[in-house]
Each structure stands twice: as C-alpha cells, then as structure tokens.
Image: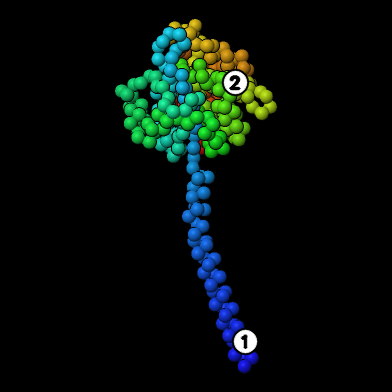
Amino acid sequence: MKKILFKTAFVVLALSFASCKETEKKEEADSQPQEETQTAEKTEKKILFVVTSHDKKGDTGKPTGYYLAEVAHPWEVLHEAGYTIDFVSPKGGKAPVDGFDLNDEVNKKFWEDEEYHAKIENTMTPSQVNPKEYEAIYYAGGHGAMWDLPENEELAKIAAQVYEDGGIVGAVCHGPAGLVNVKLSDGSYLVSGKKVNGFTNEEEKAVELETVVPFLLETKLIERGGQFEKSGMWEPHVTVDNRLITGQNPQSAKGVGEAILKELN
C-alpha cells in the first residue's frame, strides 16, 4: 500500500514539474518580442535637426525660414548612413522654408521623400524632445535662425545635454546662432575656447542684411569666447573642435554632415 502511495505521489510531482516548465517556456516566449522591441529602440541611431520657426527678415517684410539645402544635404549624408533624423523647431509644427530650389537634386530628393516631408511639416516642440535619444544635434541655418534660436532656453538645454552626454553638436551658416547662449553645467559657454565657424560679417554685408539681423554672428561667437575661423566669401569651410562641428555658409552644409558622420564613426 505504501509503495502505491509513493508511486502516486512521485507521478503527481513529475506532472507538476513538467507543467511548471511549460509555463516558464510560454512566459519566455511571450516576453521575447517585447525584449527585442526594447533592444531595437535602444540601438536606433538618431540625430536631431533644429530648424527655425521665424519667417520674416526683421522689418523688411521679406520671407525667410530654414535654408532648404542646409537641411537636405546633411540629411542625405546621415540618412544614407543609417541614421534616423527627427526635427524640432521653437514653435513646432510646419517650419517656414527659404532657398527653395528643387533644381538642386538633393533638395528635390529630400522634399519628395514622403516620410521626411511629413516630418519637416510637423516638427516637434522642444518639450517633446528627449535628449537621451540622440547621438547628435544639428542646427540648420537660414536667416530666420538669427531671431528665434538664440533665446530659446529649452533648445539650449537640449544641446548642452546632448554634448555633455558625449554627443556631437553641429551647425551651419546662421545655425550657430542657436549656440551663442548654450551653457554647459559648469556655467561656461559651449563655444568658449573652441574653434568655431559660421556666416561671416563679410557675407552678411554682401547680402545687405548686416543692419537687419539682431546681431552679427561672427562678432557674437567671438564675444562668447569662440576662436572664429573663416575662408573667403561663399567658400566651403568646416571647423571641427572637440565634438563641435560648424560650417560657414550653405556651400558648407554637406561638409558639416560628412564631418558629423566621421565623428560619429
């Protein structure tokens, strides 16, 4: 009788053990897709592009915005290298565009890309951005940048965090206007003591807007402690110094994208 009871108990325990193992396997299988998704999210390579929301050149009534080539050319370089590009502007939503030239094949490629056309027409607000998601932040130029990017404290904090987390800060032409008030956690200006570049005083005078813009970008960057570099007017010039990458004019936009990619690699 004892032997029968012992055998019965053994069978029950064996069945219970087998049942537990099956439950564990099912739980593992159920959790696997979620774990894979979380891993994919962590490994996605993302760069944040900053564009202006400002659409007028001072009191002139003339339209402005972000300069299309200064978005499209770096976008092509970085997107083709496997990076996802997100867009943010001070006000969010549709960003005004300047330099709208679709005879430029890269501009046309960007503008006709359905995914990215939708993104640039529906930019994020700074409050929607998580800086931890991005390996780099890049400020596109266009004269509009001179009015609304310098004083935007939220964007300045995002740029500082990306930089202090080991990321890259890039800008081209008037884009560095967004950097003039970026301060690091030690209270110093991001550009202080670093080689930096941007739209020159000579170029601003050449387009006859030196008395229209709120300040001269070259002068302001020097005031902030930047070691300003430049080439002749309209010549490509890209400056790289300690994860700060800046370009002089629209002709430098692709070069800035290439320099960002090189630094990321």
- Give the vertical position of 163 relative to 227 (above or below): below
Q: Which of marks 1 and 2 is in front?
A: 1
Q: What residue lies at 39% left-to-right and 19% top-to-bottom?
A: 98
Left or right side of 69 for 239: right
Residue type at mark 1: give it: Phe
Tell me residue 74's x, y (percent): 44, 29
According to the picture, the residue beneath numbered tag 2 turns out to be: 181
Does residue 140 sit above or below 14 in this rendering? above
Q: What element carries label 1?
A: helix
Q: Which label was assigned to residue 36?
A: none
Residue 150 appears in the rendering? yes
Residue at the disc numbered 1: 6
Q: Residue at x 43, y 14 (%)?
A: 56
The picture quadrant where one finds residue 167 is top right
Question: Who comes first in sequence, dot 1 or dot 2?
Answer: 1
Image spot of residue 130 (x, y percent): 55, 36
Q: Quadrant of residue 192?
A: top right
Q: Is residue 260 visible to the viewer in this orientation of the structure?
A: no
Q: Badge 2 local density, few (<14 within 10 Å), some, or many (20+)?
A: many
Report, in whole angstroms, how far the alpha carbon at label 1 lies from the one at label 2. 80 Å
Relative depth, front residue between 109 and 119: 119
Q: Which residue lies furthest to the right in this view?
A: 186
**Disc 2 residue type (three-letter):** Asn
Residue 5: image x %, image y %?
61, 88
How many C-alpha atoms fall within 10 Å of the one at disc 1: few (<14), some, or many (≥20)?
Answer: few
Position of the N terminus by quadrant: bottom right
Is 236 above or below relative to 213?
below
Q: Nearer the viewer, residue 123 or 99?
A: 123
Name which residue lies at 58% across and 85% down: 8
